[in-house]
Amino acid sequence: MHYHSLNHQSPAVDFRTATIQGQAPDGGLYFPETIPRFSADFLLTLKTLPAAEVAYQVMAPYVGDAIPEEELRRICAETVNFPFPLAPITEQIAALELFHGPTLAFKDVGARFMSRCLGYFSRQETAPVTVLVATSGDTGGAVADGFLGVEGVEVVILYPAGKVSPLQERQLTTLGQNITALEIQGNFDDCQRLVKQAFADVDLMQQQRLTSANSINVARWLPQQIYYCLAWQQWQPQLPPVVAVPSGNFGNLCAGLLAHVSGLPVAHFVAACNANDAVPAYLLSGEYAAKPAVATISNAMDVGNPSNFGRILALFEAEHTRITGLMTGYSITDAETEQTIQQVHTETGYLLDPHGAVAYNALQRHLAAHPTPQGGFLLETAHPVKFREVVEPLLGEAVPLPAALEPLMQRPIERVPLPAEYTALREFLLNR
Ligand SMILES: *Cc1c(COP(=O)(O)O)cnc(C)c1O
């Protein structure tokens, strides 16, 4: 499989190069040259296949011969070694729970897959590879955990001092081994600026092998197709589901579209957004305009110019009617999100996190306007405990910490405080 840049100014590359580079040299997103079709046999037997086999069948055509079969099977098995239950909420609506991974984030799947691919590719290198990431909270934890113990890869995470939640800080600073957390005396933009400066530092880049674990990386984007296949395994009705995806950068939804184009049955996609409505506005009008990001209570979706929008256009040759035939967008306010969390909890006992609540509300609206006998499901992308400051006041009760997180609270915090100045980061990287 080859990947071309959507800016069309860089040469096509294989999976290995696309993974190591992340973004094409011309600044474009990598996109597969052809969309593989699931075989009739795969679709027929899908409901009975083990998760690791599903992951391997989905990913093999995209990886091509960049990774030998045995190695890719091991990577796939390690990527999906936790449950992905489809939990019924009402007769019409279920939740695909994607928060049972090690950091309770759905980004665990992409981070685990990418880290292991990079670990494999770095085995052919003599010097270790350093992954440099800036995080505002959640992504850093999933990336750090994904790379934990991967040989030949060092991870350096920059996070803003005092601006991540205590739980998130523990997820970044207590892992040890090949993970180092830098506590930057500044905000998230400072962290991002420092990382960009490092990548632009020709002298530093000649001395060290630095790479990013950016969410636009194909090795983080493509494995998200697996969620939709694992959901289909658990889907009982004859008719295919309506699927609602809480969206920010649209990597997850775009992966779902890809799986559907490859042959996975889905009746319709619901693009569920908060106040950041660039894509729902495009779906309504056919005109796309990036907007400044607005802060909301579903903050992992606060994206004004979704980076994967270009991939959605590429998938459907930018034909607006083909896209609107398959997906409808909804923009949900914070008040509606809060009301949904409260109401669903009161009426059904199910506790949604703010991101899942946006998707629930959008799905409910879509089903009210387009009734179907089979209903659908939403992707629940985070555990509600990660947003306890939003959820607890609405319920008037505490959300208990899952047992899996207890050890985290016991481990010692290790972090390196640094001023938000590039010379300090440079010195740190050179003197490790
Ligand atoms: C990242 C994230 C999203 C948005 O996913 P995209 O692929 O960027 O659209 C939604 N919910 C949670 C909890 C996230 O962390």
Image (cartoon, grey):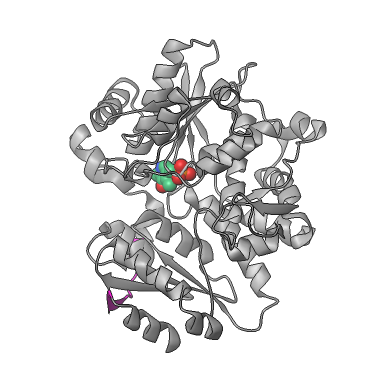
Task: Pick whichever, 227 or 10, lies toward us.
Answer: 10
State whether residue 228 appears in this view: no
Q: Residue at x 55, y 52 (%)?
A: 110
Q: Residue at x 75, y 31 (%)?
A: 43
Q: How many marks?
A: 0
Residue 153 found in image quarter: bottom right
Image region (quadrant) for ligand 1: top left
Please indicate whether residue 11 sits to the left or right of residue 301 in the image.
Answer: right
Magenta range: 408-420
Residue 304 screen position, x and y as percent: 36, 43
Residue 145 screen position, x and y as percent: 47, 62
Q: Quadrant of the C terminus?
A: bottom left
- Magenta segment: does it hold 335? no
Residue 225 screen position, x and y as percent: 61, 41
Above or below for 265 versus 169: above
Residue 354 found in image quarter: top left
Residue 15 found in image quarter: bottom right
Residue placed farthest to the front in the image? 9
Above or below for 192 versus 85: below
Q: Residue at x 30, y 26 (%)?
A: 340
Please indicate whether residue 365 sits to the left or right of residue 347 in the image.
Answer: right
State whether residue 166 appears in this view: yes
Task: Pick whichever, 227 or 295, lies toward us.
Answer: 295
Above or below for 183 versus 279: below
Task: Pick whichever, 118 or 352, lies toward us.
Answer: 118
- Magenta segment: does it hold 411? yes
Please indicate whether residue 159 sits to the left or right of residue 91 in the image.
Answer: left
Please indicate whether residue 15 sits to the left or right of residue 410 in the image.
Answer: right
Q: Residue at x 35, y 67 (%)?
A: 193
Residue 287 screen position, x and y as percent: 45, 30
